[in-house]
Image (cartoon, rainbow, N blue to C red):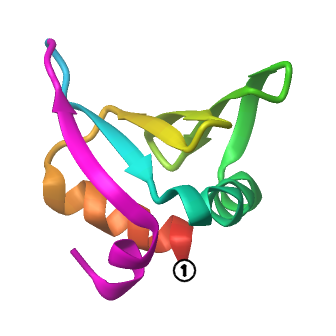
Amino acid sequence: MSIVINDYIARIEEACGEERDYIIHFKYDKKEEVITKILKKATLQKTTAKIIFDLKYKETYIRLYATGKAVFKKIKDKEQLNQILTELLS
């Protein structure tokens, strides 16, 4: 992981299923900053009570939670995930 990613991310998990999905847990003290950065760069598709945000960034679908967790869908591999996270969090 890059330095930028290490500053913001507490943990990355790979979800089970047909497609590769990744669950990202952001550091608690950085979650507000992360949410703001991602909302500025990704396209908002739908929001539920400002708690859950469905977003699209390039060809990736992101479900961002106000709790500091995000699910990244349609990711080929961890390298692509790291690239997208670096772009969103820079």
Q: Residues within 10 Å of mark 1 (few under 14, many from 20)?
A: few
Question: Is 77 contained in the magenta span?
Answer: no
Q: Residue at x 44, y 41 (%)?
A: 59
What residue occupies the far top of the structure in this picture?
18
Image quadrant occupied by the N terminus: bottom left
User: Closest to the observer: 42 or 53?
Assistant: 53
Q: Is residue 71 left or right of residue 76?
A: right
Q: Residue at x 51, y 36 (%)?
A: 62
Does 14 sit left or right of 82 as displayed?
Answer: left
Q: Is residue 43 above or below residue 28?
A: above
Spot occupied by residue 66 in the image (x, y as percentages of width and height): 68, 37
Indicate yes or no whether the magenta region holds residue 16.
yes
Q: Amino acid at mark 1?
A: Ser
Q: Farthest front residue? A: 29
Q: Furthest residue to the right? A: 49
Residue for badge 1: 90
Q: Of 16 and 43, which appears nearest the observer?
A: 16
Which quadrant of the rendered structure holds the C terminus? bottom right
Question: For the magenta stretch, what is the residue range?
Answer: 1-17
The relative height of residue 30 versus residue 78 in the rendered view (above or below) is below
Q: Secondary structure at mark 1?
A: loop
Q: Residue at x 37, y 45 (%)?
A: 24
Counting from the top left corner in percent of width and height, residue 74 is at: 31, 32
How far across and down, in percent of the image, does residue 11 sit? 28, 52
Locate residue 83, reporting x and y percent.
Answer: 32, 68
